[in-house]
Amino acid sequence: VINTFNEMLMELAVETETDMVFMSEEFCGHGYYSDDPVNVCYAEGNDNWFDFTCIHPTPGGHDNLAGMFSMVVDE
């Protein structure tokens, strides 16, 4: 479902000539359950970038998100 939604957003971004950041790729494995080895993107030592709601970023998540946007803006 997420991939289909991202594809639709990418089509819209291409049509409107706007930039887009794929958070799911960078943030995979850094959710609230980042320390769970069953997690599909689990890697030992991954930082948790989301609070308990899995919606709002932690301070580390904000830093990484800001870095992603900065790279897009700087291109």
Image (cartoon, helix red, strand yellow):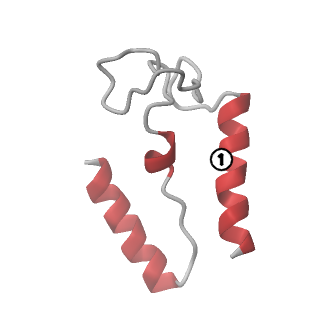
Compared across the picture, whether 58 is left or right of 43 comes to right
Q: What is the count of numbered marks?
A: 1
Q: Name the residue under label 1.
A: 65
Residue at the image position 48 percent from the left and 56 percent from the top: 22
Residue 3: quadrant of the picture: bottom left
- Which amino acid type is marked by label 1? Leu
In the image, residue 27 sits, relative to residue 60, either above or below, namely below
Residue at the image position 70 percent from the left and 39 percent from the top: 62
Compared across the picture, whether 75 is left or right of 19 comes to right
Residue at the image position 37 percent from the left and 75 percent from the top: 11
- Relative depth, front residue between 44 and 23: 44
Where's residue 42, x and y in %?
39, 27
Residue 17: quadrant of the picture: bottom right
Circle 1 Cα neighbour tier, 10 Å, few/some/many (<14 / 14–19 / ≥20): some
Where's residue 75, x and y in %?
68, 76
Residue 45: quadrant of the picture: top right
Residue at the image position 54 percent from the left and 60 percent from the top: 21
Where's residue 13, x and y in %?
48, 75
In the image, residue 52 sits, relative to residue 16, either above or below, namely above
Where's residue 33, x and y in %?
44, 18
SS at badge 1 = helix
